[in-house]
Image: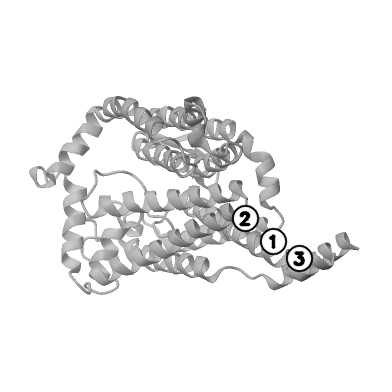
Amino acid sequence: MGARKQAQRWKDASRQVGLDPILLVPAIGLLAVGVVMVASSSVAVAETYAVGPWHFVIRHLMYIALGLVLALSLRVLGTRQIGAMAPYGLAAAIILLLLPFIPGLGHEVNGSTRWINLGIVRFQVVEAAKLVIILYVACYLARRPELDRRGFADTLKPLLAAGLLGVILLKQPDMGSAVVILAIVGGMVWLAGAAWRHLFVLGLTSVPLITVAALEPYRLQRVMTFVDPWADPFNAGFQLTQALIAVGRGQISGVGLGASVQKLFYLPEAHTDFIFAVLAEEFGLIGIVAVLVLFGVLIGRMLQIGLRAQAMEKPFQAFICWGVALWIGLQALVSIGVNLGLLPTKGLTLPLISAGGSSLIMTILAIALVVRIQWELAQAQLARPRRRERFAS
């Protein structure tokens, strides 16, 4: 009778539990901002490619739809099944990142081989690799509680895995994504309670490696341009100076939706890497703050769900939430920092806002996974036997 009663309680809980509005509202809000800004910023780009004015926004909406379809698969695929596949995540991430090097499959854009050609679309494999490595590291850390009391090797292994992916990414080359992956895994290891002395030693050893990677001629030029973009405003500093002009024109309330001047062939990649600069120009400081608030609520809620999972002794789910929060937060921070001239130029999209199918689809799927975890936690909470029933049994 007890087992039957518990099964019935789970069924009842499934009907009562809804989706978390604190998580969904900012995510939907950022998607809506993205649709508006892609529509506004891509008109001039569409003219350049001799396609219809709504070409990029229609494609953007199609990617959102595809991401939502994939997200619906999590209705039947729970964290238990995902956890069974997670140990193979490192191998899957390595295979994904090596696919662009296969002749005939890889696709090169502006000297970088980061995409694979799937016929009708191109897919940037690192976006899938980010989610896969988060699952792998979450599984690894969940099996090693109290990381601060364990040996140095237990802290080193996930960072070595991230380093291996970083080496492959540098060959594409894609240093921005390499740094993001290292930062995500480093943040997850820190949240797992790794000893400060271990992290300090690893940080010191990584400094010369990052320095050597940054000394590549074109990367060094980006750093020098970041220091003084106005030294060469019509060549190396062109992107950054145009972004700064756009942000400056926005002032407090912006010039109005669709009224941006910088998106009209002045600002390269206005609908992807520098979409935030266009948003700042059209909506001003008010728009900047609104987007930052939406990201803050979304990331904060993910961290909170992770803490709840940890309190309910579900470490795998907790580390997934924290990993996804770190991914979206760090990538948004870098993208916004580049647009505001606070960081050197990197080819990273602004999550949920920039045009870019690979990033958009995988970010939606990652957020859907956190939504699934929150739903499972709420279901488990409701399905717990009440205290009176425990004593009665």
Give the percent coordinates (x, y) of residue 79.
66, 50
Does residue 321 lie above or below 379 as drawn? above
Residue found 52% across the figure and 55% down from its top? 307
Residue 86 position by quadrant: top right
The residue type indicated by label 3 comes to Pro
Q: Are marks 2 and 1 in contact (CB under 8 Å)?
A: yes
Q: Which residue is mark 1?
A: 380
The residue type indicated by label 2 comes to Met
Task: Work out which quarter of the rendered image holds the C terminus and state it.
Answer: bottom right
The numbered dot on residue 312 is 2
Q: CA distance from mark 2 to mark 3?
A: 15 Å
Give the percent coordinates (x, y) of residue 132.
55, 41
* Front disc: 1 or 3: 3
Q: CA distance from mark 2 to mark 1?
A: 9 Å
Q: Which residue is mark 3?
A: 385
Disc 3: CA contacts within 10 A as few (<14), some (14-19) or many (>=20): few
Residue 3 position by quadrant: bottom right
Q: Label 1: state its secondary structure.
A: helix
Image check: 209 left or right of 105?
Answer: left
Q: Label 2: state its secondary structure.
A: loop
Residue 45 versus residue 361: which sits nearer the camera?
A: 361
Q: How is the image coloured?
A: one colour
